[in-house]
Amino acid sequence: NAGVTQTPKFQVLKTGQSMTLQCAQDMNHEYMSWYRQDPGMGLRLIHYSVGAGITDQGEVPNGYNVSRSTTEDFPLRLLSAAPSQTSVYFCASKSRGQWQPQHFGDGTRLSIL
Amino acid sequence: AQKVTQAQTEISVVEKEDVTLDCVYETRDTTYYLFWYKQPPSGELVFLIRRNSFDEQNEISGRYSWNFQKSTSSFNFTITASQVVDSAVYFCALGDSGGGADGLTFGKGTHLIIQP
């Protein structure tokens, strides 16, 4: 019963470094998305995917790239980390049915120095 | 554009009191979905309930109840006889006709503190 797995759980980067946040789900869900959570801001959508090979931008996509080569994986790449990207990142997946809720991973806490 | 407003940033009550968390939403869609999630201090997001725009029936689950009113665009959440374990941040979220396939719009959350 792994559900949505995010790695790493914690990461500290220096400004300008790049890294990839991993997200994998084992529920065969078509839809996956990335959110960031900042104090007092709730969760904001970064990118989402409705299937392998299909991605699109959410509310706050700048500075992030995604790809979806398989149904299971949806990595989020920070191209050149900036202090403004310090946040908690959540990956989510959901099945095709309209009625189905999103399932969230446990989050990755990222600090950019 | 969709929007979710949770006007209560923080609520503090004493254990066993009833508490209502407000959620007001905006959307131009006629078909949409509303969700409540709980984020305990451990940080994970826990799904609580979903409601579609065609079902205004209120729902009760144990000490939890939800009041959906399309006329006021509200989807409020009430905890009866609150307990310390209810302390968490609660998020209301809105999905479009795809149920959030292209992501959900979240409110900023209400931090609920239940004091013993």
Image (cartoon, grey):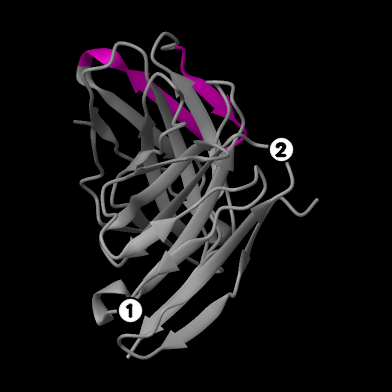
- Residue B70: in magenta span: yes
What's the amino acid at mark 2?
Answer: Asn
Residue B25 sits above or below residue A14 on the image: above
Magenta stretch prevailing secondary structure: strand
Front-most of residues A19 and A36: A19
Q: Is residue A65 visible?
A: yes
- What percent of the width, then of the height, locates residue A37? 36, 62
In the rendered structure, the answer to whether residue B11 lies left or right of residue B57 reads left
Return the chain for callout 2: A
Q: Identify the mark nearer the N-term, 2 or 1.
A: 2
Residue that mark 1 sits on: A81
Residue that mark 2 sits on: A28
Examine the image and state in which quarter residue B89 appears.
bottom left
Element under label 1? loop
Residue at position x 46%, y 25% in the image: B99
Element under label 2? loop
Q: Residues within 10 Å of mark 1 (few under 14, many from 20)?
A: many
- Disc 2 + disc 1, Cβ < 8 Å: no
Q: Which residues are magenta?
A: B57-71
Residue B68 sits above or below residue A110 on the image: above
- What percent of the width, then of the height, locates residue A2? 76, 54
- What percent of the width, then of the height, locates residue B64? 53, 36
Q: Is residue B13 visible?
A: no
Return the chain for callout 1: A
In the rendered structure, the answer to whether residue B115 lies left or right of residue A64 reads right
- Residue B49: in magenta span: no
